[in-house]
Image (tube, rainbow, N blue to C red):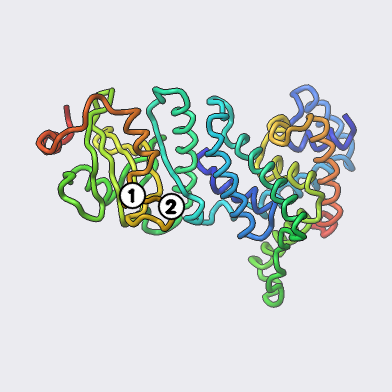
Amino acid sequence: MVELLPRLRRLGRVLARAPADADDLVQLTVERALARRAQWRAGTRLDSWMFRIMKNAWIDESRARARRGDVFAPEEEGERAGADGAAAMEARLTAREVESAMARLPPDQRIAVALVLVEGLSYQEAAEVLEIPPGTLTSRLVRGRAALMAQIGEAGR
Amino acid sequence: MTSEERLIAYVDGELGAQDRAAFEAEMAADPELAAQVAAHRRLAQSVAGAYAPILEEPVPPRLAPLAGAANDRGRRPGLAQWAAMAACLALGVLAGRTLWPQQGPLVTRGGALLARGDLDKALTKRLAADGGVVRVGLTFKALDGRYCRTFESAADRLAGLACRRDGGWAVQVASAWSPEPAAGYRTAASATPPAVLAAVDATIAGEALDAAAERAARDRGWTN
């Protein structure tokens, strides 16, 4: 609980890759959470509640952008050249591979994978955040992971 | 449950004890299955690892429009929820801040948000009449008998309410605050943020202390 804003930023970065877009999403989430604070029930998980708000904010924002013909900017391809073999660069490349593989997942699968693998939520918690039945969640997790596996798993790391 | 579902449920720790034992027995007899599990474990680690550094980044100031903490259980419906939620946000901001070499005015300890440095000093020593970069506003006794004081720190752009606790000051609510009114935002200059006023309302017993009582309380070291 102590690190909720950083975690919201992290989930935001999975959903909207460009950091500025991600932070916009976090801001929108915090604003909505404050406006609806009366709806949060004490004793329930605040993180799940805010993740749900973020999920809905992201869906709304994606639709609004689609209507405007605007899309969430893909993260620019950074400098990949040079320093081949350096361990730090290697780690960064791996992270980039993961990020681009995640970005290629359909949104439904991406957020399911993010909640379970990145945020460490249980299946039940993740299903509640996404407002879907547990069976739907597991099938998204299976398909999402299979796609990720196909893209980065083969790299043999 | 399909075999793929069962496999990831195992990796994610979602199987019950019995199913887990059964799965592990199968795995022991089936190197192919064990290799799949290992591959899924590596995948889970890479995905988690790819995004982990984001937690270490300082939280941008614009994401902390309000930051508050309240340890007292709310006495009014709604306030407890509000306070608990604000506390989480505040702590999130702090978690970001602690990465910077010179920390901010607040520190978390034992689940409480404590004033430190100049803020702690101002709360302990300063009177409302003194002014300064960190100014103290109202001083009053809380329902539980503790002394509480509101503060505004121009240096930290923070306003809040702190109450005496174990020789320090536990910050009940902290909110972004600006010495100048932000254009088009608020008309009253240096207005105490509503979140702070609400916390005062919820905490105060009787009236705020007058200047003489404030001085006397300070000179007694904020003991009753």
Q: Determine crowd level at label 1: few under 14, some 14-19, many 20+ residues with C-alpha closer than 10 A.
A: few
**Residue name at image x 68 percent, y 49 percent:** B48
What's under tag 1, amino acid-wise?
A: Ala
Looking at the image, the residue that sits furthest to the bottom is A82
Q: Determine crowd level at label 2: few under 14, some 14-19, many 20+ residues with C-alpha closer than 10 A.
A: few
Residue holding disc 1: B188
Q: Is residue B214 above or below residue B131?
A: above
**Residue name at image x 44 percent, y 48 percent:** B94
Q: Say which element carries label 1.
A: loop
Q: As drawn, is A40 to the left or to the right of B22?
A: left
Residue A9 position, x and y percent, is 59, 50
What's under tag 2, amino acid-wise?
A: Tyr
Q: Is residue A79 above or below residue B5?
A: below
Residue B45 position, x and y percent, is 70, 48
- Front residue (pair A146, B68): B68
Residue holding disc 2: B185
**Residue name at image x 75 percent, y 41 percent:** A112
Q: Chain of mark 2?
A: B
Residue A118, image quadrant: top right
Q: Say which element carries label 2.
A: loop
